[in-house]
């Protein structure tokens, strides 16, 4: 399934991918940061301070592995609500995230208007997203068309779940992207659930990436718990796009370790044994073990990263909690250009 | 009589109807094993099986389009759109197909189906889990639109909708699901589609409202009652076809009409109600037909302060009542 | 000044704008090599090339969704929906996405694009090539809706729409494409979105209308003029935002208002115009705000006799004017 | 491309398919009848008596070859506007067709309400169609689901053009049909044009049938000028459906010999040389030649069929021309059940 090369020659995957120890530590930092922010949002939710959380737990390797390829402010990113790891990797700050989670006036993503997880950041070229599933795939295609027309070197990265593949918009976007050989990477975070609907109620195929060839471009399926597999597939897709060869569809097989959202009770539709078993394969643990095995991380260094992250998240939370709500007048602004 | 919540009224109507008639199927996202994100279909999957309680793929056009096909082949589908905000991809199937099948085939084909969907705000749903979508559909002859707001009305009208030979869009205000309770008969009953209900009698002023706003209006009417103003509150229950008779009779009696709705003001269905009154009760009016509605901003923000500000509140409604009563 | 038909006004505006600004692109079904099924985009493909005049796949959601993306990345797309009846699959992209981008992003993103579409009947188009779809969109803050009806207005407003920083739905009545001619300046000009135009002055009665109906109303007003009734005809030109000032000023002067529209009566945008007048000009009204519209049947039949019967005719409009004038 | 067996053993295709001479003559009759009705509609259009025609010329072998498999009144048929050959094969009468073309009160298809080509016939299980492209694919899926649930032996046949494959509804229908292994046959009349849009502006692939496997069922591409190739593929698909093995997608490569419709001027987007060349391969001529070569048709028999058809079409036209228009009151009926 995974497209990483089998390491008969015992070359470590990161070495064969040309990733430096610094690169790896950056990925690790983003993973730890993402996890900490996710945990904080849940904690605030349980305290009644935050109305909604959609956790990315289980998706981190897919998100951060792929987003590590993105050139912030150059390539376009169209995340969906579960993509905390993507936006943090591209450069959203913890403060920007917490302001959004707490729906404060200063929230750069939505000005306190949208639920958490609806990012948008013009400077980072993170395109403002909505809740209706799969609409953003068409936006990504249109963006890529414009990049191509303007002969600008920018690749559109669009993220979505397996549920989104059922929508007509996904089809129309892939078809359009295929026709015009657009510089776009479709990244499907395939956790096999659309809230409660299992894969077999969503599609009759094993790997949804197989659909890509029906649109005239390649689809690959990778182990979404494996940062390197995801990174490699994404980098290839990105290079392909930049060479003018068109789109690629990447399916990252992941597992959603938490309920769909803070409103969901996943015991209704999956066994907790299954969840427990999956938690043992936590992508963050796996990556940490890799770093340790490679001698790139020890207890001291790990503690340093953890405490740096904790400090950042604490600071961001404090700031956001003290930040003002939008003013009443903010209900009425920005309906049209002013 | 037993006391039920709105969501229970929905559930019970579905359960009883499915029990009564095995042509009835339920389809939608998470309606099966999960029992629905609001639990409207709780237990149906176990009781009636996965073939009649279909966990559909995440595809609203697909849900409605397939339901139309099922209706054309002898089933009676009750399709759920998880949130009304996500009904837009299905607009083509609803407006072009379901609503026009009978007319376009000279009556040879019909489309007996129900589309249930939770609408409205006040649940911290933000821009995309709070919308009131009725105006997108109210200019669609061939479609019936029902929007009851109490357990009794919901159960009786959902059963009527399921038994109706034409497509019915059934709007359920999600904030009222667990907020509103009321008595419901234990025996089977249906209520007529197209019949309004005077929820509170009064002689000074008529207020027409539905959904969460209906309950706010009733609360405001209580307040006004204490101030000596007798407000009559009319719940249309069905939006299309609208029971003009009941509404006009009330306005002809009171001489004043206030229409309260949660959707954005401009182009909302309240305009139709207001325009109808203005034209057909003109000679009886002692004051302007007044509308109070959500502001013309894209939708209800997630921030709780702005959300509260978006909704016509009991205060704002009371104020509008006072103003019109004193006209 | 030169005399042009409505369709030429559309064409010329597109041509001149594309010439002026190479960020502007045109996209839709058959807009390229074919020049559009109504010839609105005739010659653009040759002049500006296939990259800027995009023959899209047959996919309306795709057209609008991709156009939104283009708008987000520095282009100014003018998307064509071949017939308004086929806009429904794009409703989600229009309402959920284009219209809400600015608000939902706190103003960080905008969506400068135009959606052009031919609407309305009288061309033997049958149920699915005749519809008036405005009411599906008029409850959507964030979207502007323009519906001009003469060559001068069309050209000036289409240019304004293209230069507007927000999404504009641009409705073109297809029956008027080659029916209506009028003078158009040779030099570049724009007209303001949101400004109505008094197409005929009068003191006895105000009629508000747009599209084919506007021209029928003007004809009827001529007739009434001969009968001694001076009808003022107001063309809103823009539906959202509606120029209430001009409309209310006229009604306050005449004391009577008739709203004529081609869409199905119930839930049509005419209800908004009527409700606004009824509420905001109440003290000036000498007769009921009256609506004359298409009947509440799914759409205009193909049979030419039934088609003619569906449309509010000059006769029916004259009759309504007489009745209201005599109130 | 075609899936007919190469006839090394010199067995005639109809023999190996088990088609009797009577079957062939029936197919031939339907082809001649379809052609005559198509010609008559055009003639009435030029006389100003008919507002709209969408010709099926070039699609007859695909339409009649496939529809010959359908059990009238048992299997469901969801045609699109170009499918005159389909509905005539299933059993619409010339009179019913002409009443529809002339939009008369008695028109069983639409009661004079829809443009010609929007068939519907409850008795024949021809499902009322609309103009929006591709909506009917979902109806077909829903119908097939109901057949399966009720354990009824009925297959849904849904027809559409290549243009329709671009729509989201097509994707959603194929996905749904695949998940539930529904008894449905998707028949794409692939003429390589959506009005003026050529194949390369519609999709990046050669054969759209290749998409089927992405939904978990087979897709085949056949020569749509070859009645036998189409018949064979359809019969296989129909048998598969009846065996409970699920959907099949059949792509019939055809050529649209006439403009898109009576409102279209195809000289704007294709060369008339190309059209002329294609006319030489007219599927009706091809089938007639086959029958002659097989000794199943001679001049006398052909003349007999032609004159029978002419008589039927004349009678139908006369009847329909004299038939009354809908009454004014018919504008208002059948909005809801009465
Ligand atoms: C058009 C639409 N329909 C329904 C929903 C409600 N909803 C939100 S998330 C979701 C499931 C999405 O599943 P998937 O795409 O696999 O993403 P995941 O949550 O598994 O990461 C649904 C049904 C929605 N947001 N949009
Ligand atoms: C949703 C929708 N959009 C646009 C149209 C206008 N239209 C009618 S037919 C057609 C082309 C259809 O092409 P195809 O599906 O290949 O069928 P063909 O006419 O080639 O047989 C178009 C664009 C329509 N009817 N429906
Ligand atoms: Mg998922
Ligand atoms: Mg075609």
Image: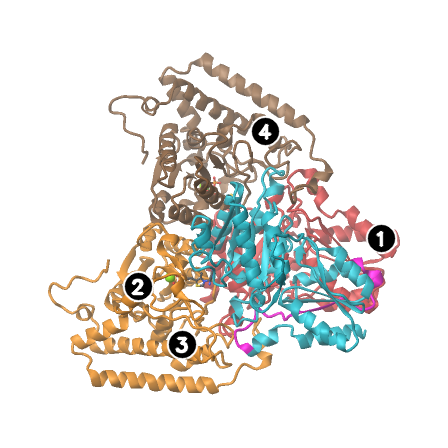
Chain colours: A orange, B cyan, C red, D brown
Mark 2 vs 4: CB contact within 8 A: no
Q: Residues within 10 Å of mark 2 (few under 14, many from 20)?
A: few
Which residue bears the numbered disc 2?
A274
The circle on residue A42 is 3
The circle on residue D96 is 4
- Which residues are drawn in magenta? B279-304
Circle 3 — which element?
Answer: helix
Report, in whole angstroms, how far the alpha carbon at label 2 lies from the one at label 1. 74 Å
Q: Residues within 10 Å of mark 4 (few under 14, many from 20)?
A: many
Report the side of C210 relative to A187 (left or right).
right
Percent across and percent down for residue B84 are 54, 61
Percent across and percent down for residue A304 are 26, 86
| Marks 4 and 1 belong to one chain | no
Regarding residue D97, the answer to whether it shows in the image is yes
Report the side of C79 relative to A57 (left or right).
right
Q: Is residue B229 above or below residue C292?
A: below
Mark 4 or mark 3, which is nearer to you?
3
Q: Is residue B230 magenta?
A: no
Q: Chain of mark 3?
A: A
């Amino acid at each position: 399934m995974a497209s990483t090369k089998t390491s008969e020659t015992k070359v470590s995957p990161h070495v064969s991918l040309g990733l430096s120890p610094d690169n790896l530590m950056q990925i690790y930092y983003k993973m730890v940061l993402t996890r900490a922010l996710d945990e904080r949002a849940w904690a605030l939710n349980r305290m009644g301070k935050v109305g909604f959380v959609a956790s990315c737990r289980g998706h981190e390797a897919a998100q951060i592995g792929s987003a590590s390829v993105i050139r912030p402010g150059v390539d376009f990113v169209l995340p969906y609500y579960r993509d905390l790891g993507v936006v943090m990797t591209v450069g959203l700050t913890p403060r920007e995230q917490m302001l959004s989670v707490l729906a404060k006036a200063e929230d750069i993503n939505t000005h306190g208007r949208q639920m958490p997880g609806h990012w948008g950041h013009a400077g980072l070229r993170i395109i403002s997203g909505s809740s209706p599933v799969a609409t953003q795939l068409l936006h990504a295609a249109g963006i890529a068309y414009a990049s191509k027309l303007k002969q600008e070197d920018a690749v559109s990265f669009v993220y979505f779940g397996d549920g989104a593949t059922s929508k007509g918009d996904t089809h129309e976007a892939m078809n359009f992207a295929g026709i015009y050989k657009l510089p776009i990477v479709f990244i499907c975070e395939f956790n096999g659930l659309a809230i409660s609907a299992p894969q077999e109620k969503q599609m009759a195929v094993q790997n949804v990436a197989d659909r890509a060839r029906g649109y005239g471009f390649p689809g690959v399926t990778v182990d979404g718990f494996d940062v390197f597999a995801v990174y490699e597939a994404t980098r290839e897709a990105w290079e392909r796009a930049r060479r003018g060869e068109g789109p690629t569809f990447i399916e990252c097989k992941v597992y959603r370790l938490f309920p769909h959202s803070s409103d969901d009770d996943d015991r209704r539709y999956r066994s907790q044994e299954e969840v427990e078993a999956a938690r043992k394969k936590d992508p963050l643990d796996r990556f940490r073990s890799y770093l340790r095995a490679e001698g790139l991380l020890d207890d001291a260094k790990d503690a340093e990263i953890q405490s740096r992250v904790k400090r950042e998240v604490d600071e961001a939370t404090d700031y956001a909690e003290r930040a003002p709500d939008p003013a009443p007048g903010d209900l009425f602004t920005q309906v049209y250009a002013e | 009589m037993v006391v039920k919540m709105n969501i229970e009224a929905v559930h019970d109507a579905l359960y009883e109807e499915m029990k009564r008639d095995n042509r009835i199927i339920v389809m939608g996202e998470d309606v099966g094993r999960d029992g629905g994100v609001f639990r409207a279909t709780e237990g149906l999957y176990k009781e009636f099986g996965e073939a009649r309680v279909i966990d559909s793929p995440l595809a609203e056009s697909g849900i409605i389009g397939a339901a139309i096909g099922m209706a054309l082949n002898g089933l009676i589908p009750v399709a759920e759109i998880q949130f009304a905000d996500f009904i837009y991809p299905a607009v083509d199937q609803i407006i072009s197909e379901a609503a026009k099948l009978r007319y376009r085939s000279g009556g040879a084909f019909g489309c007996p189906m129900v589309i249930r969907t939770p609408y409205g705000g006040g649940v911290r749903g933000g821009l995309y889990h709070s919308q009131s979508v009725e105006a997108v559909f109210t200019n669609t002859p061939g479609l019936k639109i029902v929007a009851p707001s109490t357990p009794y009305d919901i159960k009786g009208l959902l059963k009527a909708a399921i038994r109706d030979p034409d497509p019915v869009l059934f709007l359920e205000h999600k904030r009222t699901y667990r907020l509103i309770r009321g008595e419901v008969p234990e025996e089977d009953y249906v209520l007529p589609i197209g019949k309004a209900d005077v929820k509170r009698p009064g002689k000074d002023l008529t207020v027409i409202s539905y959904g969460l706003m209906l309950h706010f209006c009733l609360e405001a009417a209580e307040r006004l009652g204490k101030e000596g103003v007798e407000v009559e509150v009319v719940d249309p229950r069905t939006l299309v076809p609208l029971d003009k008779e009941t509404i006009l009779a009330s306005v002809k009696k009171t001489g004043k009409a206030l229409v309260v709705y949660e959707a954005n003001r401009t182009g909302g269905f309240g305009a139709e109600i207001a325009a109808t009154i203005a034209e057909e009760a003109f000679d009886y009016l002692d004051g302007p037909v007044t509308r109070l509605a959500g502001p013309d901003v894209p939708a209800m923000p997630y921030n709780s302060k702005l959300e509260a500000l978006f909704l016509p509140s009991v205060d704002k409604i009371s104020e509008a009542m006072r103003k019109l009563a004193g006209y």
